[in-house]
Image (cartoon, rainbow, N blue to C red):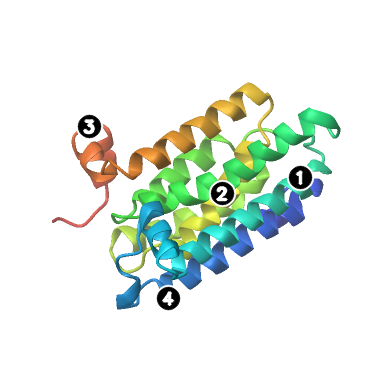
Amino acid sequence: TAAAGAPAGSRLAAALAGGVSGLVGGYDDLAGARPEQARDKGLAGHLRALRAGRVSAGAVKVAGIGAAAAGTALLSAGGRGARDTRGAGALVDGVLTAGLVAGTANLVNLLDLRPGRAAKATALLAGSTLGGPAGTLVAGPLGATLAVLPADLGERVMLGDAGANAVGALLGLRLAQLTGRPIRTGLLAAVVALTLASEKVSFTKVIEATPGLRELDRLGRLPA
């Protein structure tokens, strides 16, 4: 649906970003559940596994999403949303696109720790970016997210890495098509900062301690 709704120059990029991110996320859902993979969680866990000579399922996912993000940046450079196709400008746009696609894919997945949390965040972000020529890119993913939200809140399903990484990558691609490099640079900086903070700080504890966020997070969930 993202590829079908994307502007003409972004359709292949959307298919690549969402498709590959979903596939490697699905692999991590399956292989990462094995007992020997239990300790290889988070960036630090993946690095420890590599130092020990093991390739964790999460590392495979990171590499796959990174490659998809780089490919998406290359495809986007020739699309309608390209701002500067030569020199330093093209390089900066490519880095911003790749960073937002990969970073947002990971960030949405980090939120998928409580029923409905990642889906609510996805719906809010997708809904706020529906405007503009590239807004149709997230219309389909927004509809799919809202459709699955009741079952997610009811603890019958969860997005998992497959769903969260796919929809996060597509949200990142949408953010990468916003006009103005300062805006996209600020968004990427925020994504990176939140990702690094997640290694030290529990998002759940922060949400529970923050009025407004706490109520939104609990909205629609089953009683504890």
Q: Is residue 141 above or below residue 97?
A: below
Query: Which residue in the protein does label 2 denote?
Result: 102
Q: Is residue 176 visible?
A: yes
Residue depth check, mark 1 versus mark 2: number of the one nearer the observer:
2
Query: Which residue in the protein does label 4 denote?
Result: 31
Ranked by sequence position, the earlier of labels 2 and 4 is: 4
Q: Secondary structure at mark 4?
A: helix
- Give the percent coordinates (x, y) of residue 172: 58, 44
- Give the percent coordinates (x, y) of residue 59: 48, 62
Q: Residues within 10 Å of mark 3 (few under 14, many from 20)?
A: few
Q: Residues within 10 Å of mark 4 (few under 14, many from 20)?
A: some
Tag 4: amino acid: Ala
Q: Is residue 74 above or below residue 67?
A: above
- The CA span between labels 3 and 4 is 35 Å
- The CA span between labels 2 and 4 is 21 Å
Q: Secondary structure at mark 2?
A: helix
Query: Which residue in the protein does label 1 denote?
Result: 76
Tag 2: amino acid: Ala
Q: Secondary structure at mark 3?
A: loop
Look at the numbered discs 1 and 2 and tell me whether their residues touch, using CB distance below 8 Å: no
Q: Secondary structure at mark 1?
A: helix
Q: Is residue 83 visible?
A: no
Ranked by sequence position, the earlier of labels 3 and 4 is: 4
- The CA span between labels 1 and 4 is 31 Å
Q: State the mark number for residue 210.
A: 3
Residue at image position (38%, 51%) is 110
- Give the percent coordinates (x, y) of residue 60: 52, 66
Number of marks: 4
Ranked by sequence position, the earlier of labels 2 and 3 is: 2
Residue at image position (62%, 63%) is 20
Residue depth check, mark 2 versus mark 3: number of the one nearer the observer:
2
